Image (cartoon, rainbow, N blue to C red):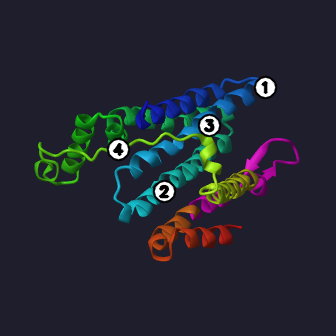
Amino acid sequence: VGRRPVFLLAGTIITVFGVLTSFVTNFVGMVLVRFCVGLGIGGLTVPYDILAEFLPTETRARYLLMLDYFWTAGVVLVTVIAYFTIGAGISWRVYVLICAIPCLASVVLGIFLVPESPRWLALHQRNDEALAILRSAARINGHDPDIIFPDTQRLHQEREENASFSELFVPKWRKLTISIWGVWFGFTYGYYGAMIVITRVFGKDINGDSIPDFDYASIFLSSLAEAVGLSIIIYAVDKIGRVWAQVHSYGIGG
């Protein structure tokens, strides 16, 4: 179906079930709606695919990493929203509802601003549409599309390969597959584990009762630290390589 529809569907799922979270009244309902939000989050890797298929190899790593600034901005933003809602004694339901607004905005903006991947279009013999998007991108970047992509331009016909999930475990790819899975499991386990526990570390009870309170300034600063680490990695990734950039950052984070 293409990259763009999947991105919009994922954003819509997160928005809808994020809003529904604020209306949940029992534990089972909370588990179900948050499970659906998680399904939507699984589709948020698609924007990386769309951008990667626009970028030349020499700048791909740097610009893909720059997307993570928006993730960091989101982490900081939810802390600020929490301070002005939960921290001010307003219901957590209002907090959750407000947190769904940026995702709704991304869906709306995606409808009007995010194009389909030209590579995906070319793979499916929709060359005229792919070329129109590339010409538009050239125009936006201040280049003359008639020079870069003239009307006589023909896109290279890349052959789409059919592969099954089991091919990840053939001898050629088995070691790489397991290694990447292990790295991503360790990274996400550590990252989300830290994000969950940080509310406990900076949390406190008011007068010994069950009303939660948090050190919002400390949470804000710890979240903002992601931008510092990200900036360092963006600078280093093309200098020391992808592997060593990960080794150093995971080692420091651990």
**Residue 95 — which label?**
3
Find numbered disc 4 in the image and state the secondary structure of the residue it sits on.
Answer: helix
Amino acid tagged 1: Val
Look at mark 1 in the image and give the residue it sits on: 28
Amino acid tagged 2: Tyr
Circles 1 and 2: CB atoms closer than 8 Å: no
Tell us which disc is closer to us: 4 or 2: 4
Amino acid tagged 3: Tyr
Tell us which disc is closer to us: 2 or 3: 2
Amino acid tagged 4: Arg
Find numbered disc 2 in the image and state the secondary structure of the residue it sits on.
Answer: helix
**Is tag 4's residue or tag 2's residue first in the polypeptide sequence?**
2
Residue 227 against residue 114 in the figure, above or below = below
**Is tag 3's residue or tag 1's residue first in the polypeptide sequence?**
1
Q: Alpha carbon of mark 1 to alpha carbon of mark 4: how far?
A: 42 Å
Look at mark 2 in the image and give the residue it sits on: 69
- Residue occupying the far bottom of the picture: 240
Question: Per the image, is 200 magenta?
Answer: yes
**Is tag 4's residue or tag 3's residue first in the polypeptide sequence?**
3
Return the x and y of residue 138 as percentages of the image width and height.
21, 50
Residue 235 located left or right of residue 204: left
**Residue 119 — which label?**
4
**Is tag 1's residue or tag 4's residue first in the polypeptide sequence?**
1
* Residue 216 visible in the shown view: no
Provide the residue span drawn in magenta. 199-225
* Residue 165 visible in the shown view: yes
